[in-house]
Amino acid sequence: MNRHPTRLLAAALAAVLLAPADAPAAPGANAKSAAKAKPAAATAAGALRAKPVRVEIDAPLPKGLPRDLNLGGSTTVIAGDGDSSGGGYAVTYLFRGKGIVGVDADSLRVSSAVAGGADVSKNDRGRDSWKAGPFPSVAEDGSAATFEVRLAPGASHVKNAVPVVHGTIGIECATGRETKTATISAKPGSTARLGPLSLKVPAADDEDDGDGADAALAAMVAQQAAAGGDGGEEGDAAMAAAFLGGMFGGGGDGFDLEVSGDGSALATLVLVVDGEDVTPRSWMNFGRGTTYGFPAVKSDTVRVKAEFWTGRRTETVSF
């Protein structure tokens, strides 16, 4: 379901703001936040269920009704214009438990979705209308998680009614974590092993940010042009490049570390400088793995510390 970026951002932020005070932190929690997590015992097996805390409807409301409808509790309905995306729904769910470390969005399954008495689980072509939304989030203490289910049945099937959606999703839990460290030379091209991970200090001529950052830069310039950017092509490109430079590594004035291998159990990754943990200020996934951008280092060698989840398992949660 294609939806306006501004509306999506507002929905993501409101989903957190409308949740209870001890609900998850904002999507995209960084390594520093994750480092604070103190997972308790893994969630006990049993009838686990998530509850809806927010519903967004992309459909016009009848005249005379307010744009935001308070349905009681923390559930809210926001009406869109019904035109930009072809109509659809987004339902945000909250799950409370113990030792939560992630949400397996690929495991999402929807068994039924009904709105206004109509089945909205299929689109106009008879295919599944549902998919997992981006940026599931987890509380720093592992006590809660949110995820979003999106439905795009087509404008003609969208009703001014709250959808009732049922299904299952996998919530990843852990009982604790273990710490591993490695030392790597700061010289470009240097490599080292850290548990199941391979570390590399990328050289200027083999960094993957050429294709990835160039594509991102082109996309941002196009977005600025569509939004009426008035800095001219060069000005818009410079603005986008400055933003990407800060996001993808700080314009070359920092220390980049390429990490590849099985990172499924990775909880945090930091540098240890003068006895203090230094968290990455940026990271980007490329073909060979993830490149983390740290502040510049002055020593010839770098100590890298990673924490890995232990006792990991996936609990099937109903909603």
Image: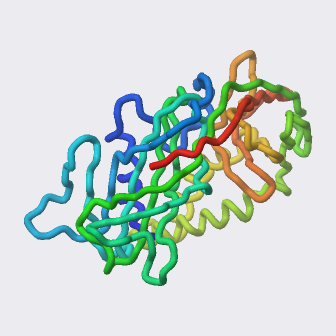
Residue 42 place in picture, x, y as percent:
62, 29
Which one is nearer the viewer's eye here, 295 or 111?
111
**Could you tell me residue 289's position as x and y percent?**
77, 51
> Is there any visible trace of residue 310 in the rendered image?
yes
Q: At 78% from the left edge and 41% from the top edge, which residue is drawn?
A: 257
What is the residue that sits farthest to the top in this orientation? 275
Does the image show residue 229?
A: no
Q: Nearer the viewer, residue 284 or 101?
A: 101
Tell me if residue 300 comes above or below residue 56 in the rendering: above
Residue at 52%, 52% in the rendered image: 168
Q: Is residue 148 left or right of residue 297?
A: left
Nearer-the-camera pick, 244 or 276: 276
Q: Quadrant of the N terminus?
A: bottom left
Please, which residue is most extreme toward the front here?
46
Q: How is the image coloured?
A: rainbow
The quarter holding residue 217 reads bottom right
Q: Position of residue 310 (x, y in %)?
A: 73, 30
Quarter of image, res 180: top right
Numbered circles on residues, count:
0
The percent coordinates of residue 132 (x first, y second) are 52, 58
202 displayed left or right of 144:
right
